Amino acid sequence: MGKKAKAKEKEEKTPYDLIMGKEVTFQLLRGTIIDGIFAGYHLGFFIVTNAEIKGAKNICKTDLVFIHRNQVQHFHLKGEVKPKA
């Protein structure tokens, strides 16, 4: 087994690896919602592809968006939204 193979075995998985390639929803601090496919995290930015950005007055669809970690209130896997009963 070579050095590269050993190094790859020692690489720890991050929680972001669990959601890589899955549909996610981000809510930013000022209420903007971003839906898309989680592509990764790099240098303090979350990377989302096939994104739909929903603001107070407008909706934008884009192939790629970088979201700074300090702007995120929370994020989760995309789920079903239902009104309270």
Image (cartoon, helix red, strand yellow):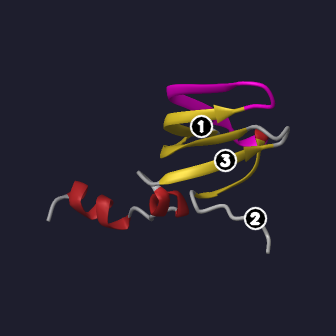
Question: Residue sitting at 14 percent across and 65 percent down?
Answer: 1
The residue wearing badge 1 is: 43
Q: Residue at x 79, y 70 (%)?
A: 84
Distance of label 2 from label 3 (alpha carbons)? 19 Å
| Horizontal relation, residue 19 to residue 1: left or right | right
Dot 3 or dot 1: first in sequence order is 3
> 41 or 6, which lies in front?
41
Residue at 83% of width from left, 42% of height from top?
A: 29
Give yes or no for contact between labels 3 and 1 (Cβ–Cβ under 8 Å): no
What's the residue type where badge 2 is placed? Answer: Pro
Q: Is residue 32 magenta?
A: no
Helix, strand or loop at mark 2: loop
Q: CA distance from mark 3 to mark 1?
A: 18 Å
Q: What residue type is disc 3 on?
A: Phe
Q: Secondary structure at mark 3?
A: strand
Q: Position of residue 73 (x, y in %)?
A: 79, 50
Position above or below: 18 against 22: below
Count of numbered badges drawn on the protein: 3
* Residue matched to label 2: 83
Q: Which residue is mark 3?
A: 26
